[in-house]
Each structure stands twice: as C-alpha cells, then as structure tokens.
Image (cartoon, grey):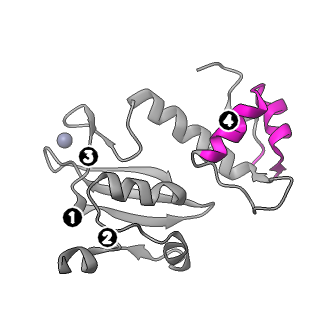
Amino acid sequence: MSSRNNPNRIKIHRSYTVIDVSETLGVHPKTVRNWIRVGLPVFDEKRPLLIRGIDLKIYLKQKRKTYMHQCEVHEMYCFKCRQPNNPNIESLQFIAKPAGMAQMTGGCEVCGCKANKYVSWRDVNQIWLELGGKFPIAEKHLNLRGKALLNCPLNKVFNDE
Ligand SMILES: [Zn+2]
C-alpha cells in the first residue's frame, strides 16, 4: 500500500468531502467513492457526502490490517491457526462502537480461539449471511441498540427454524 494513503494525515475532528479526502490522501475520487460503497460510513446521505475524519481514520487502519491478513469480510485472523478463519456463528457477537463501527468477536471455527476485529455496521448483514445466517439483519434495528452488547442478534429466530 502506498505511503501517501496514510491515516495519520486525517484530522479526526474534521469532516471531509470526497474531494477533500482525495486531495488529502492523494487518491482518486473514484477510489474514495468505492470505499463508501464497501463500508466507509458517511455523515448523512445528503450531497455533498460528508465523511467524518474519525470514521475515515478507523476505516483506513482497518483496511490496512485486513489487507495484511487477507481476511474476507466475514473472516477473522486466528493467531493460533495463523490464518484467517470463519468464526463459529453461535459464538458470534457484534458490539456497537462509535462512528458506525462494530466490534465483531467470535471463536475460531477450527480451534475455538477467540478473535475480534472492527467492521462497519454496513457489513454486518453480509457477514451474517456469509456465515450461514438465515435472515438478513435489519441495520436500523441494530443501530437502535446503541452501545449495548449485542448477543448474536438473530439467535432466537435461528433456533426456531
Ligand atoms: Zn483457530
């Protein structure tokens, strides 16, 4: 990854437009729009789209980490197995964090070792479905829970099947 694409250039208390981000990091505006499409949170849905510095910083750090370990969005890096593995769906938890992020924790499907990583709330549905969840999770429903610890959100529905 190029050194220009450096989260340290981002000021956390500022808001950025797509063009601002593009100029600050020296990346193409298309790249920034693509980040938004794949999970970078935006401040609201109005135009011009505004991205909070803190969101961008977390996103870039996470992206770099994910890149290093080459995890798919639903995988977590297991330090015991030394490779990305799926978490066991029954152990999966999402904990709400500020800035549209969630901490995903779960036991490695192979060895049971606990792992965690940060994901965007936007990815929670996809992660859930890729791990074998039966129904999509309504994103709004999750956001309403605020900072509470979420047990596997559809445990009940899942067990009723
Ligand atoms: Zn493992």
Q: Secondary structure at mark 2?
A: loop
Residue drawn at x 26%, y 57% as measured from the top left: 132
Q: In this picture, is 39 found above or below 80?
A: below
Name the mark nearer the viewer: 2 or 4.
2
Nearer to me, 47 or 100: 47
Find residue 144 and report its horizontal and vertical position in percent: 55, 79
- 112 relative position to 57: left or right: left
Q: Is residue 94 above or below residue 29?
A: below
Q: Image check: 148 left or right of 3?
A: left
Q: CA distance from mark 3 to mark 4?
A: 28 Å
**Would you say the residues marked 2 and 1 are in contact, meaning their CB atoms lie under 8 Å apart?**
yes
Asked if the residue under mark 1 is in contact with the one under mark 4, i.e. CB atoms within 8 Å, the reply is no
Q: Is residue 86 magenta?
A: no
Magenta-drawn segment: 11-37
Residue bearing the label numbered 3: 86
Mark toward the start of the polypeptide (4 vs 1)? 4
Q: Is residue 156 above or below residue 33?
A: below
Of circles 3 and 4, the one toward us is: 3
Amino acid type, label 2: Cys
- Residue at image coords 75%, 53%: 52
Q: Main secondary structure of the magenta part?
A: helix
Does residue 39 appear left or right of residue 130 in this picture? right
Report which quarter residue 31 is drawn in: top right
Q: What residue does disc 1 label?
A: 90
The label on residue 152 is 2
Tell me the number on the disc at residue 7.
4
Q: Count neighbours of disc 2 (C-alpha within 10 A) and say few if under 14, some if 14 to 19, many if 20 or more.
A: some
Find the distance from the CA under tag 4 to the CA under tag 1: 34 Å
Three-letter residue code for mark 4: Pro
Mark 2 CB within 8 Å of ligand 1: no
